[in-house]
């Protein structure tokens, strides 16, 4: 038995839209305004989302409960699995004293905090976005910045702001691949179009993140570094996306950006600026000594400090390769159809094309894949175990630290499970489409508001991939109805979505967990919200220009 979604349950578009927005309003209001602990706010938001799905949209009870369980399970695996194992690795490096050595190594390479945030949050973070995605770059870079002396709020907020331009090509092009599947537009065509939007912002973001940290004067003081990192990322991003495809865009661009920064720092250093440095640096006074567990410590100290992260980078990259994933999945990748939800929900026009006798609408799938061996989190765990053994930790000590890490992130895991449950309930009940249709009814200004729809999708779901799956078809259909190039609007959904990454609750929880600042998510949200909305508006303006104004129209892939 199937259940067809309907997107105006109150028979009044305005009222239906206001009701559909309630879960988001309650969630964000509880966090930012009333300062409710985020796991409690997430559970409250989930309760509201379920109430609306059942009471207003008349979603079957069994399907609604199955959706909640499906979303929570996805939150724990693979996303929670990534965070747990990444924090485990971080804990080992802190306990061994290697994180202090890493901090000193980075301080020697880039002693100025403004340069550190460009190199680490933007360039280094982009590599992890390209290789793994799903919160990995924010967790890694926020933890490193915290250890370099940044305040928890800054480490979290700056990592979130920097993790924008790479997101559309994250996890080896997964968002573009998913967008291609729901729109029928080729992966290469979408890659080309997104590659003609995001490079503008790859140039802007290094300047923007330093401005957010140090103000205008502080940003001007390191403009050579910001320009170098941006150009070295943007140019390869354009070239690879337009002449190769979406798969290796971020990895190639990130490596070029890191290399360019290292070369620049050999010949150029910014002038000291004590006035703002004193306001933006904080030392925790926790000077940890190296444990000296084994002969591993005979190696050069800087190399020792970087080795766990080199192992992490290598294994995450290898784990992400399609051939490796496929091989590991053949060993163990059970998939479970979610009872009560799989092929029960049917999307209806205008989100999908009107069904015909020859081509009926296919019900939505709901399959949970427990690909534990090929999951990115498993690669991170392997890197952590190898690094821990090299540091001299015994298996018993590794288990003890792993248990302590699990206790540390327990509330984060609950939060992420609840957040993903909210996203899945809104998706399968159709409330997300009600919000999307409200933005789609904007006529000539649809290119601008359609871009904001991508932003909204990521802010709700925490994933550019999920936003593309939810709204990709809607963007294509609406574009065709309004006479706009559908490739432009499909790409705009993904490009606009990247700006929503910094305000989605999942990413904020990852950042607060990585900086051991759990419970202050409202402060982080307030810190990044303006930056997220401002960058989304700028992206909307660019797409509007590409739709109507020469010479920007020549950028659109036909």
Image (spheres, grey):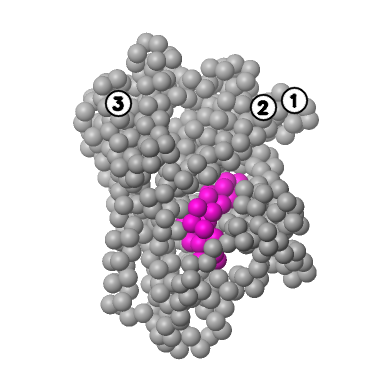
The residue under label 2 is 544
- In magenta stretch: residue 391: no
Most frequent secondary structure within the magenta stretch: helix
Relative to the observer, which residue lies in front, 296 or 273? Answer: 273
Secondary element at image label 3: helix
Name the side, left or right, on which 449 lies relative to 240: left
The residue under label 3 is 53
* Count of numbered circles on the image: 3
- In magenta stretch: residue 165: yes
Residue drawn at x 41%, y 20% as measured from the top left: 18
Question: Which sits earlier in the primary sequence, circle 1 or circle 3?
Answer: 3
Question: Which sits earlier in the primary sequence, circle 1 or circle 2?
Answer: 2
Quarter of the image holding residue 345? Answer: top left
Secondary element at image label 1: loop
Secondary element at image label 2: helix
Mark 1 and mark 3: Cα distance apart in space = 41 Å
The residue under label 1 is 549
Residue stretch rendered in magenta on the structure? 139-166
Of tags 1 and 3, which is closer to the observer? 3
Residue drawn at x 28%, y 66% as measured from the top left: 403
**Contact between labelled residues 2 and 1, with CB atoms less than 8 Å apart:** yes
Q: Is residue 307 visible?
A: no
Q: At which x and y percent is residue 411?
A: 31, 52
Residue drawn at x 74%, y 56% as measured from the top left: 221
Relative to the observer, which residue lies in front, 272 or 167? Answer: 272
Q: At which x and y percent is residue 279?
A: 60, 57
Mark 1 and mark 2: Cα distance apart in space = 8 Å
């Amino acid at each position: 038995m199937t259940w067809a979604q309907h997107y105006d349950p109150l028979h009044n578009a305005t009222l239906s839209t206001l009701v559909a927005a309630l879960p988001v309003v309650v969630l964000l209001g509880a966090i930012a305004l009333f300062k409710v602990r985020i796991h409690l706010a997430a559970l409250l938001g989930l309760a509201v989302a379920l109430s609306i799905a059942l009471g207003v949209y008349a979603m079957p009870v069994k399907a609604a409960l199955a959706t909640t369980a499906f979303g929570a399970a996805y939150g724990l695996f693979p996303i929670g699995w990534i965070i747990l194992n990444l924090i485990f690795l971080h804990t080992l490096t802190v306990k061994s004293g290697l994180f202090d050595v890493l901090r000193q190594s980075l301080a020697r390479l880039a002693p100025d905090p403004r340069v550190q945030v460009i190199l680490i949050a933007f360039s280094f973070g982009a590599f992890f976005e390209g290789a793994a995605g799903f919160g990995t770059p924010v967790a890694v870079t926020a933890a490193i910045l915290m250890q370099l002396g940044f305040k928890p709020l800054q480490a979290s907020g700056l990592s979130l702001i920097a993790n924008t331009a790479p997101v559309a090509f994250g996890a080896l092009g997964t968002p573009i691949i998913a967008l291609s599947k729901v729109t029928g537009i080729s992966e290469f065509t979408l890659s080309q179009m997104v590659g003609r939007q995001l490079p503008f912002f790859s140039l802007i973001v290094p300047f923007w993140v330093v401005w957010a940290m140090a103000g205008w004067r502080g940003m001007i003081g390191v403009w050579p570094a910001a320009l170098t990192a941006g150009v070295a990322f943007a140019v390869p991003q354009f070239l690879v996306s337009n002449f190769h495809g979406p798969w290796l865009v971020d990895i190639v661009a990130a490596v070029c950006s890191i290399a360019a920064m290292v070369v620049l720092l050999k010949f150029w250093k910014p002038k000291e600026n004590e006035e703002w440095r004193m306001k933006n640096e904080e030392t925790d006074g926790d000077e940890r000594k190296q444990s000296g567990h084994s002969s591993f410590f005979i190696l050069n100290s800087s190399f020792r400090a970087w080795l766990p992260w080199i192992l992490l980078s290598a294994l995450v990259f290898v784990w992400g390769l399609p051939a490796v994933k496929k091989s590991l999945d053949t060993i163990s990748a059970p998939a479970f159809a979610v009872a009560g939800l799989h092929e029960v929900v049917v999307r209806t026009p205008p989100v999908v094309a009107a069904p015909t006798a020859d081509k009926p609408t296919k019900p939505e799938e709901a399959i949970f894949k427990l690909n534990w061996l090929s999951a990115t989190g498993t690669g991170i765990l392997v890197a952590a175990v190898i690094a821990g053994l090299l540091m001299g930790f015994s298996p018993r000590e590794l288990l003890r630290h792993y248990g302590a890490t699990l206790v540390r992130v327990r509330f984060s895991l609950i939060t992420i499970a609840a957040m993903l449950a909210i996203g899945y309930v809104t998706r399968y009940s159709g409330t997300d489409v009600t919000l999307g249709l409200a933005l789609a009814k904007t006529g000539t200004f649809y290119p601008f508001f359609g871009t904001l729809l991508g932003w909204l999708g990521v802010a709700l779901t925490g994933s550019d991939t999920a936003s593309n799956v939810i709204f990709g078809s809607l963007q294509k259909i609406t574009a065709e109805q309004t006479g706009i190039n559908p490739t432009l609007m499909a790409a705009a959904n993904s490009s606009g979505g990247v700006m929503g990454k910094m305000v989605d609750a999942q990413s904020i929880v990852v950042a607060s967990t990585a900086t051991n600042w759990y419970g202050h998510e409202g402060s982080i949200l307030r810190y990044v919200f303006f930056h997220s909305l401002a960058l989304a508006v700028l992206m909307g303006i660019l797409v509007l220009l590409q739709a109507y104004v020469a010479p920007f129209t020549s950028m659109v892939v036909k």
